[in-house]
Image (cartoon, rainbow, N blue to C red):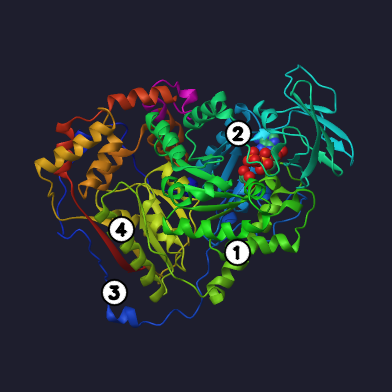
Amino acid sequence: MGFGEVLGFGRIPLRNGFGLSARPVVARRRSSLQLRLTLTEEEAAAPTPETPRSSGPSIASLFPERFRPFLNVLDDGSLSVVDIPAFNARRTKIVCTIGPVTASYEQLLKMAALGMNVVRLNMSHGDYVFHDRVIGHVRRINTESPFVLATMLDIGSFDQVRLGEFPGKDLVLNAGDQLTITARHEASYPENVTEVSDDAFMDVVQRGDVIEVRGNLDGSVVLLRIQEICNGGKDARCVAMEAGRIRSRAPIAIRGKSFKSSLPQSGAFEHDLEFAIRERVEMVALSFVERAEQIMEVKAQLRQNGASNTAVVAKIESAAALEHLPGIVQEADAIMIARGDLGTDIRYDMVPFWQQKISQICRVYAKPCIVSTHFLESMVLYPTPTRAEVTDIAEAVKQQVDALMLTSETASGKYPLRALSLMSRVALRIESKLATGMNPSRQIPRFQTNNSWSPDVLRSAERVCVTACAISEQLEAAAILCFTQRGFMATLLSRCRPGCPIYAFTSSVMARNKMSMLYGVRPFRILFDGDPEVTVQRAMDELRDRKALRPGDRVVVVADVLGGRNRATEEEMLLVFGSLDRENRGHISRALVRRGLRELGLKAADDVELETWLDDYDQDQALIEECTIAPNYDECMEQVAGGIEGNNSEQAPVLDSAKTRARRRMLDQVDYAAFRQLVQDSAEIVQTIQFRVME
Ligand SMILES: Nc1ncnc2c1ncn2[C@@H]1O[C@H](COP(=O)(O)OP(=O)(O)OP(=O)(O)O)[C@@H](O)[C@H]1O
Ligand SMILES: CC(=O)C(=O)O
């Protein structure tokens, strides 16, 4: 069985200097955009097969026996109704927040089987040891199972003001009970006194203000009215306006005042970001983003630490963010509509409007959109949802957002697996209705971008994707296959929301995992061959072997081929190299070379590209995944251990530290002569759309 979606066997060369293996490529065509549609008249006229295509076997049957018994068992011991979703059955992805009830390897594996695509870890809760352990389990699942998970680290509510701890149990209040919120900083407090996480809160509150306390298990908001500011301005004496239950570290807001904590300076944010970089998570989510510049700063920090592959998800959860939406969406790699906080910062009745508007803007800029919070809030306590909750899921699915996110339901609720299974089932049901024409509008919004690639390359890539989707609909293709290094082509295809699944193939573990967030995309890792035809054939064979596609199925393939010849003049090469050099203060890494090539409208052979931009971490991960499926596992792991500098063989799967990697990256500096050589060995990018029939 193909564990971890690795297709093809072979070796990714470890850390060769790219100069060694760069080889001239044979020019094939001259145009920089070419549609290759190899469809005969008979094929075009052929009727659609009468028997409807099955969506493939249940994944359970691909799983080793020992895993199967617990894969589809729900919280109460019953079996999941949906079983394990078949290949790419659901287009809308699901993000689950992981907390104490779901943090074990077994729970995570069950959730992967039930359709979880992205694991969210909220840094406001749990400690680094907790999060590190969960990330370890996720990596293991990606390596040992057929499921693909991405990890998103929510870099906590650094703007969130919280109450203190209530040791042992929740604080239960009746209407009229008193609670004092203080900034006294004492070692411990009586039961009806709690410390606020940010002293600045005391400067803002006044007598008569209403404090909203959120984060309660039953989803309720507890309201406290301030009766008196006392103790030299350090205490706010409040009274509960109605009965309620308050949890430790519950987030609070002052009604009508857009108060944000000054905690980013406290260092917690920096530590969380360092942790994200060290752990190589696929995504970091930034709370309370208000301007595009905040995202740029974080991206710069990621870049400086060799983690530019990490995607930045901007959480839209304040009125201020809504004022700067297009800028934020353009700068971020993905958007999360954090309805919990957004709903306290703006009027409740405006949340649905903004949900729709934000998801539309994301489609324009080809940025994945996640809608979060309160989807199945009642399932935190009860095994069945309310009908209104089911309708909320249905509405988001109809809007064709990329992903839906569960929070307390899976972090601390009583029925995490049921909630996930139910969300998956509702999404599947609504999607099947969309496919039968419930959603008449299939218009693709005009694409806009501020991406640094050359506009010509981008425009042609986007047109190719729109055309490929249109062809797939006209020809009733069973799937679109796409070959992509970092997932950009898959994002452009996903943006068009075609009616068939998109199977996206990449050589990078990180890119594969990140693509698991994209609507309708099923990501795989494949070893790219220097000859694109070999790569396409490898992917087709594998899809057939996995019964994801059947003989006779029509597929549309979107792939680069190497065409034309190098047209870059010495002057152009110097210009591009010079601008990369200036921007990166003399540090041109192997990964940056790829950008230089793009700017020149050029592309190296796929295997050479792979070497020039995959970082060591990705290569190490790839090798570990390959070892898992290799027949000579031990031998393979020994080689990995030998290849990973600084690790002894026992620790081989534990990847080397960020520092070691950073040092290696320094050694990988590229000079102009090496850059020039690579440019000369490259060719023009020729994007093709090919029509094929599975043999
Ligand atoms: N790692 C964790 N450890 C313990 N409890 C957790 C953890 N992650 C989440 N939880 C619990 O699940 C609840 C819901 O998670 P969520 O991430 O939505 O937290 P929140 O505090 O409401 O959100 P935010 O911090 O984003 O405003 C939390 O209030 C917390 O009680
Ligand atoms: C997820 C989150 O942070 C919110 O809904 O506020």
Query: Is residue 158 shown left or right of residue 460?
Result: right
Could you tell me which secondary element the residue under label 1 belongs to? helix
> Vertical placement of 668 versus 137: above or below?
above
Could you tell me which secondary element the residue under label 3 belongs to? loop
Q: Which residues are magenta?
A: 639-656
State the residue position of label 1.
428
Residue 461's tag is: 4
Residue 462's tag is: none
Which residue is farthest top? 187
User: How far apart are the two marked residues, 3 and 2, measured between alpha carbons?
Assistant: 52 Å
Query: Is residue 592 shown left or right of residue 75?
Result: left
Closest to the observer: 262 or 133? 262
Query: Is residue 574 shown left or right of residue 379?
Result: left
User: Of circles 3 and 4, which is in front?
Assistant: 4
Which residue is farthest left? 570
User: How far apart are the two marked residues, 2 and 4, measured between alpha carbons?
Assistant: 37 Å
Instruction: Determine the residue positioned at 62% across, 64% down.
Output: 395
State the residue position of label 3.
39
Could you tell me which secondary element the residue under label 2 belongs to? loop
